[in-house]
Image: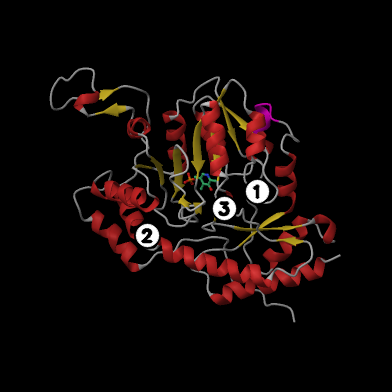
Amino acid sequence: MKPEIRSSMLPYGQQWLDEDDINAVVKVLRSDFITQGPAVREFEAKVANYVGAKYAVAYANGTAALHGACYAAGIGPDDEVITSPITFLATSNSVLYQGGTPVFADIDMNTYNISPDKIQAAITNKTKAIIAVDLTGQPVEADRISMIARNHNLVFIQDAAHSLGASYDGKKVGTLADMTMFSFHPVKHVTTGEGGVIVTDDETYYRRLLQFRNHGMTREPEEMMRNDGPWYYEMQSLGYNYRMTDMQAALGVSQMDKLDGFIMRRREIVKAYNEQLSDIKGLVLPQQHPKADSSWHLYVVRFLADCFDGSRREIFEALRQYNIGVNVHYIPVYLQPYYKGLGYTEGICPNAEAYYETAITLPLFPKMSDKDVSDVIAVVIEVALRYAR
Ligand SMILES: *Cc1c(COP(=O)(O)O)cnc(C)c1O
């Protein structure tokens, strides 16, 4: 029997907000501070405490936070930064904002994360930093990447937009790199509407991150070159207005209390997918590195081309026809017209391109009902059998 077509599109990801989240924001609206007040500090402390990092700095969004990390790392013109091509545009764009050059290292075909061997091979005397992305919520091989960074005096930045709550080798993401970025966009684990945080244990990075989000200025007397009086502030570098509002931060504080429950529900859904989709020939389910404990932002499957009569596009459209809101994460960044205009060419990361040709993201978010989950499973099985070779 064919599955029914759902009455509306099931998205691939979505926030989950309750009355107490709404009340937390309303409380800020009735208070004296609506931007950068006590809620921002509370949110920062909560994120730092959750991941086990010393410092956290909240930014207006994850992209701005990554830009801050690139600034704090000292990335500038002539510097190369090694990163993954399978990521959202934000990762490598943050390098371009600082005038640096992204260098794309290919992915591992099991985890789809950046390959430490390919990082090693991409190092030149211009390399300044590595930005590794925990794709789908599965942490990168942080032990090997840290070692490479140490040996070559590089800054290790982790783009953990997908992996809040994940761990690697028993250590929480947020304690593995020099600086780690979390995003609080509505599709991520918990949300502030727009929002990002960098966590670090390094006080110098921390101070630079604070200045950068607020025009490069300081009000700390011990940091200033001179002091004209109590009104005095000093701009010491070129920063931006990348501040988070207290309304966003209050939402974040309330959402952080739900994070572990959300991740638990994601794991349940993943278990159902893993169990019920495992028998389809040519359908590759997500593979986990033995040391990685994913927090499961995305569930990406691949339809191997030689096992199916339909193209990935036909399979994708067939799934969408059932109102299953599948997606593709991601198009290799360097294939974008803007990047091609900078001189990047097709073929530099063959694994990333092969991955892109076959990947489909299935819906995964904590608010999905059991019925939503069984609908996805039934539709994937129907479509896979229809196109099976
Ligand atoms: C969401 C995301 C970001 C940051 O995005 P913002 O929308 O600016 O918070 C960065 N990298 C990856 C891989 C992401 O998924």
**Which residue corresponds to mark 3?**
291
Residue 206, can we see it?
Answer: yes
- C-alpha separation, residue under disc 1 versus residue under disc 2: 29 Å
Q: Which amino acid type is marked by label 3?
A: Lys
Per the image, is 339 magenta? Answer: yes
Amino acid type indicated by mark 2 = Gln
**Number of the front mark, 1 or 2:** 1
Q: Residue at x 61, y 53 (%)?
A: 289
The residue stretch that appears in magenta: 338-344
Q: Nearer the viewer, mark 2 or mark 3?
A: 3
Q: Earlier in the sequence, mark 2 or mark 3?
A: 2
Q: Which mark is residue 112?
A: 1
Viewport quadrant of the C terminus: bottom right
Q: What element carries label 1?
A: loop
Residue 312 against residue 218 in the figure, above or below: below
x and y, in percent, of residue 264 in the image: 48, 66
**Residue tagged 2:** 255
